Image (cartoon, rainbow, N blue to C red):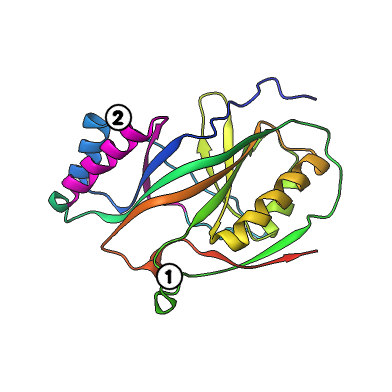
Amino acid sequence: MTDTVMEKTNPGIFHIHIDFHQLSPRLDNFATKELGFYTADFDGHPIKENGDPYPHFEPNHQLTLKIDDRKKFDAVYSQIEKVLPQCPDFVGYIECEFIPIDEYISYREYTDIKIPFHITRRNLDPGKGEKFRQTEIHLTLDRDKSHPELIKKLLNSGLYAGYIPKKDHNALVFTVQGFAKEINPLIKSLTQFLKDSGGASRATVKEERVIAYKICNIQPYDLPEIADTVQYL
């Protein structure tokens, strides 16, 4: 088997995500109709064999905009900042990111090798001055055509995951957030493991590095867990 579609990659662009814990109709309407954001909601998450869900931290509702020009990015973010005071019902956060890494992983047949890391997670600690993550990894693959044992290894490694329906396949998005000192070596280890292991269909690995953010009506410890330690095996 080979990938019939090579996933498009876009390193060097910008993303803005509006992650809603509670919907704000004013902000949702402004972002979609005035700024061109589109809905990028998750649709469930993996379940263990015993019926319990794997840990997951996807937002209730997410809007996304991808921009390839810094001036346009700055202009859009400025408009969001101006409208936020008109949206007191918005509970959630806005994350603005630069994408330094977006790599397609060519499909190869699955090989049963040990995953070379294990992640322990924790909440952000405002007492240590932690207000938001620095960066994150997204591994996206085809949930139906990727090897189930590979998926299980990734889920048990400390990554967390959710499903996003695409036009022509069902994507499974693995994520880990945190600070650069943990994430930078981890993305190299994860990418090499996927190349050595195989079994990942339509797979891409992204780093999404935060360059601006806004937290509204929530606390840092309400945000997704971050990588605390990464043990290399």
Q: Residue furthest left?
A: 86
Residue sitting at x 78%, y 55%: 115
- Residue for badge 2: 36
Q: Nearer the viewer, residue 213 or 53?
A: 213
| Dot 2: element | loop
Magenta highlight range: 58-84
Q: Quadrant of residue 232?
A: bottom right
Instruction: Report if the CB atoms under discs 1 and 2 are less than 8 Å apart.
Output: no
Q: Amino acid at mark 1?
A: Glu
Q: Nearer the viewer, residue 155 or 64?
A: 64
Q: Quadrant of residue 215?
A: bottom left
10 sits to left or right of 190: left
Q: Is residue 79 above or below residue 216?
A: above
Q: Residue furthest top?
A: 4
Can you give x and y, in whole percent of width and height, for residue 189 in the image?
73, 52
- Residue for badge 1: 130
Can you give x and y, in whole percent of width and height, for residue 221 in the image?
41, 70
Can you give x and y, in whole percent of width and height, for residue 113 in the image?
86, 50
Residue sitting at x 48%, y 70%: 123
Q: Is residue 52 visible?
A: no
Q: Amino acid at mark 2?
A: Gly
Classify 10 Å Cα crowding around label 1: few (below 14), some (14-19), many (20 and above).
some
Task: Give the quadrant of the C terminus.
Answer: bottom right
Q: Nearer the viewer, residue 92 or 48?
A: 92
Task: Give the quadrant of the N terminus.
Answer: top right
86 sits to left or right of 160: left
Residue 43 lies in the magenta-colored region? no
198 sits to left or right of 216: right
Q: Is residue 164 above or below residue 22?
A: above
